Amino acid sequence: MTSATIPSAAQRLLANLLPALLGQGVFTPGRPTVQRALVSLGDSLCRWLEQHPRIVFLGGNPIDPLPCSALGFTDTLIDPLLVIDDEQREEFRLHLAGFWRDRRLGLISLRQGLTTTEFDHLYHLLTHHSGKGLLLRNRLFEEQARGHLPHVSLIFLDDLPDTVGSLSWPARVSQGWIYRDLNLLSRAHGLATRDQLDWREQLLSASLDLSHGSGVLADFFAHLDLIAEEIDNYDKDELGFSLLEHLDDALTGDLCLQLCSRLERLQPGDDEVNDQLVKKRRTAIQWVARRLAEQMMEQELAGPEHLHALVLHKVLLYEEIPLQMRPRVASLQVLTSFLANPQKYFAEVENSHSPEVLETRLWRILEMLPKLVQALRFDVALQVLNFSQRFGPTFDLQNKPEIMARLMDAAAGVLTEAPRDQQSTLMQALPQMGKAGVHLLIDLADHHNRSVRRAAIDALIKIGQPIVPVLFETLQSKQGWHYLRNMLLLLAQLKVGGPTVEKLFRKCLAHPQANVRKEALPGIAQLLKSGAAVPVAEALNDVNLEVKKRAAACLGLTGIADQSVYKRLADILSAKDCSEEFAVQIVASINRLKLQSPESPALEIAMIGLLGTGGFLSVGGRKGSASPTLRLAVVQALGFVGTGRSRKALARLSTNQNAAMNNAVAKALKQLTARST
């Protein structure tokens, strides 16, 4: 069993306190040492509670009363067995379970410190009192009413609300605590009004503090209706708002939808129309939901989806929601009606008495596509598009750019906010939506969010060759260079060929935008192979470094059959202004090709120059590159293209190098020797 993450002093205190409350060990009544031990325990407990305002011992679920937990020293529940001596574990487990079960006690809470006198009263109640739950509860209230136990609260299993089994235990205890103690307090006529108000505020704070954690708080507030009708002599609205003030803003929206979902599940069937319990439950939940709705609207936390759900379940009237939100709520209402029975709307279109009515009704359905995607109903969106295609090109979404724009925003929202499985489902559905789906993917491929762009391009590549005619057709209507850049990338990925594609690649090599020139290089290199060496090499003169680096990389795809290209590479590597990253890319392409000697002494000399003819090797020559990455790549390349000149240069490098360089030099010399024999 793992050890509890609580201080050792607290462990000792709990180890003594638990058996004391159970009437066990040295604290058993009747023993000679009981009074002295009780005084000692009370003093240590009081000192500890002065430093820790809340200590709670929480019993287990009444369905299985044996498991018990202690809460208050950490943020999580602690098994009290962790703070009881191992050799006494089983004995105390049985006593503890019996105590909780026999007295129907669910929770002991000690709040805001505890005086010695209070401890004596508490100890007497729990260990000397022989009665069962009801009598113990009455005795506790008598002590509280007299002011003897202002910081002690007990919860009995009989006090807990009758809830569904899924409601968490801390939430159940908090609800039982509130309605039990508030009702007891309402009958405490002997207490001053000020004292009652202070106690009530303390009660609300302490009980909600027990339901720490967003999940437990959501459970508590979602079942607030279970206590609303149980409070005597308190205004329900005042109580509801007092509790909802403790709800975090981040939880209000989810709680609102959760309450509406429960109202939907409580819709009575034909045989339950007159079920009074169902009606009462719905009424109580609607009361809580309305209190929450009023708070959300006042704090401007209510979105259209919340207001729509509240109106749909008759918590609010449409006329009660803010004016500026009504159009968006109305569109959601139409969407809900459509999702309930799409075939009804399709039938209305088919039965339209005139072309004008048909057009109006069908476009009204198509305008719901963005909302269907937002609602993650991709299946219904696909049905709508398939249905619209039966009525010809008039209803192509390309005729309504505003719908396409909203549809793209909705799809991008799913790709950035929805769970991964929903994102995957969307990307599987879009290609099935025909031409509209392809156009939507094309637009998403130019989205500002990188992850959206990547997902769209991957989906287009999976579609394959069928998208090529659509790409060329759409090219005429697209403004700017982004679409052209994406088109070149897709054509290269799909390995599309032909005169039209070649002409496009060649034209784009001279495009004014560097990103377009860069994406044209891989495509033409793949398409023309060795025939692309010269046009790709011309890009080595580009003003943009990224284009030059891409050209150097793409030369590895061409095979570089033209000797003039080798001469150009030698000139670049020999130039004093050649950047290191550009040189690394050129040498990497040579290594990728694993060329035998290209009969280009100039290229060999240029690479030896990068190693240095002086500085590193001797006095008075070129110093060469200090980059370990570039020098290592050059050594590897010389093993493929070098001659006796390279062998001499490499032999000088074989000493005073790191392990990687020494290995590369040895391998290159071995290759040169093998080629010369």
Image (cartoon, helix red, strand yellow):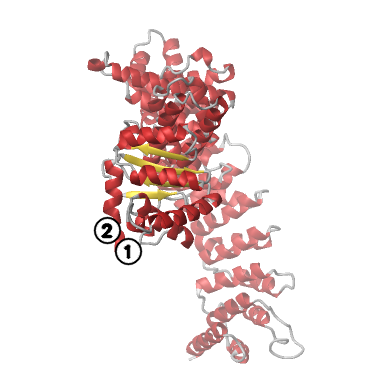
Instruction: Kindly check if marks 2 and 1 are in contact, taking CB atoms under 8 A apart as contact.
Output: no
What residue is disc 1 on?
Answer: 86
Could you say which is closer to the camera, residue 351 or residue 232? Answer: 232
Q: Nearer the viewer, residue 17 or 627?
A: 17
**What kind of residue is marked 2?**
Glu
- Secondary structure at numbered mark 2: helix
The amino acid sitting under disc 1 is Asp
* Residue nearest the viewer, comparing 455 with 162: 162
* Real-space Cα separation, disc 2 to disc 1, in angstroms: 8 Å
Residue 281 seen:
yes
The residue that label 2 is drawn on is 90
Residue depicted at 42% across the width and 26% down the height: 183
Seen in the picture, residue 552 relative to 157 is either above or below; the reply is below
Closer to the camera, 610 or 364? 364
The reply, left or right, for residue 322 in relation to residue 118 is right
Q: Report the residue that reaches farthest toward the front.
A: 32
Check disc 1 and report its element: helix, strand or loop: helix
For image coordinates 40% across by 50% down, the residue present is: 70
Q: Position of residue 452 (x, y in %)?
A: 51, 44
Residue 193, image x and y in percent? Answer: 55, 25
Q: Residue furthest right?
A: 620
Q: Quadrant of residue 578?
A: bottom right
* Residue found at x 42% / y 19%: 312
Q: Residues within 10 Å of mark 1 (few under 14, many from 20)?
A: few
Image coords of residue 635 (percent x, y): 58, 81
Task: Please rate how many residues cluster around mark 2, counting C-alpha atoms within 10 Å: few if below 14, some from 14 to 19, many from 20.
Answer: few
Q: Is residue 372 visible?
A: no
- Vertical comparison of 484 with 365: above or below: below
